[in-house]
């Protein structure tokens, strides 16, 4: 089962995939995907881990569970595919990013540019039933993502953990705050953003920590759709 992962997560999470709880969850999800609309696509569940290897992770942004609307979730916390309307929580993230670093508000909600720089966009729960928020809480994903956070915590090279909301902050107990940087605030959802998310400046605080430990800062400004299309065209022409 460790062949699910094509990078160094395979050796770290391979044993977890053989645990009884994971086998039970896998059987449950197989039936769910067969009979019910589930997000994200089965092939996208582990995208965050595929795109951001263990040793390349510099920042973790921990979300709650995937978006539960059609076409939104694609395996990264808070991110949506280009062409999908930017959800309210992500709109608030972009507002804070603009206020914090002056980045233009993107014309799409795809955060792959962050993932490629070592930002692990991880949800606490990795699947959800269509239209039913939090419907897959308690089936086993929390234990699985606990293992991911524990593995990252064991790394000698310090990381930044950005924990937005109560569910994400429950992971803080397993993080060594003497070594790693933890940035916690209310969730960016419209219901909570005004309670302390706005003004928390997570992006500049992350870069300040990375700079302090001699690590490269994250370019948080998200490329526009036109820039993404140009980059894709350049990549194809160079092949």
Image (tube, rainbow, N blue to C red):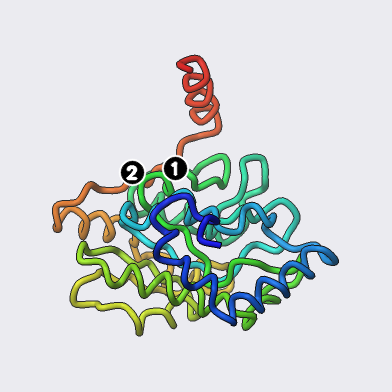
Task: Give how far apart the Cα atoms at labels 1 and 2 are.
Answer: 9 Å
In the picture as drawn, the residue positioned furthest to the top comes out as: 237
Q: Nearer the viewer, residue 81 or 38?
A: 38
Q: Nearer the viewer, mark 1 or mark 2?
A: 1
Q: Which mark is residue 236?
A: none
Q: Residue at x 65, y 52 (%)?
A: 43
**Circle 1 residues within 10 Å: few <14, some 14–19, many ≥20:** some
For residue 36, above or below residue 117: below
Q: Is residue 46 left or right of residue 205?
A: right
Q: Position of residue 106 (x, y in %)?
A: 51, 42
- Residue 87: quarter of image: bottom right
The reply to whether discs 1 and 2 touch (Cβ–Cβ < 8 Å) is yes
For residue 47, above or below residue 160: above
Residue underneath mark 2: 219
Q: Position of residue 114 (x, y in %)?
A: 42, 47
Q: Residue at x 83, y 66 (%)?
A: 36
**Circle 2 residues within 10 Å: few <14, some 14–19, many ≥20:** few
């Amino acid at each position: 089962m460790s062949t699910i992962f094509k990078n160094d997560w395979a050796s770290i999470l391979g044993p977890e995939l053989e645990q009884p709880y994971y086998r039970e969850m896998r059987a449950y999800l197989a039936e769910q995907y067969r009979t019910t609309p589930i997000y994200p696509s089965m092939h996208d569940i582990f995208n965050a881990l595929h795109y951001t290897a263990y040793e390349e992770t510099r920042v973790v942004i921990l979300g709650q569970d995937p978006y539960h609307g059609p076409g939104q979730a694609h395996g990264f916390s808070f991110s949506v595919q280009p062409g999908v309307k930017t959800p309210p929580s992500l709109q608030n993230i972009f507002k804070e990013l603009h206020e914090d670093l002056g980045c233009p508000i993107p014309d799409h909600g795809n955060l792959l540019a962050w993932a490629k720089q070592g930002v692990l966009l991880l949800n606490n729960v990795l699947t959800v039933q269509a239209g039913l928020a939090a419907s897959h809480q308690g089936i086993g994903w929390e234990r699985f993502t606990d293992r991911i956070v524990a593995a990252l915590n064991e790394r000698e090279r310090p990381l930044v953990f950005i924990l937005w909301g109560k569910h994400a902050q429950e992971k803080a107990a397993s993080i060594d705050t003497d070594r790693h940087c933890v940035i916690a605030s209310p969730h960016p959802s419209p219901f909570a953003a005004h309670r302390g998310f706005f003004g928390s400046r997570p992006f500049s605080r992350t870069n300040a920590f990375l700079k302090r430990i001699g690590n490269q800062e994250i370019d948080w400004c998200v490329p526009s759709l036109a820039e993404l299309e140009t980059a894709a065209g350049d990549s194809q022409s160079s092949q």
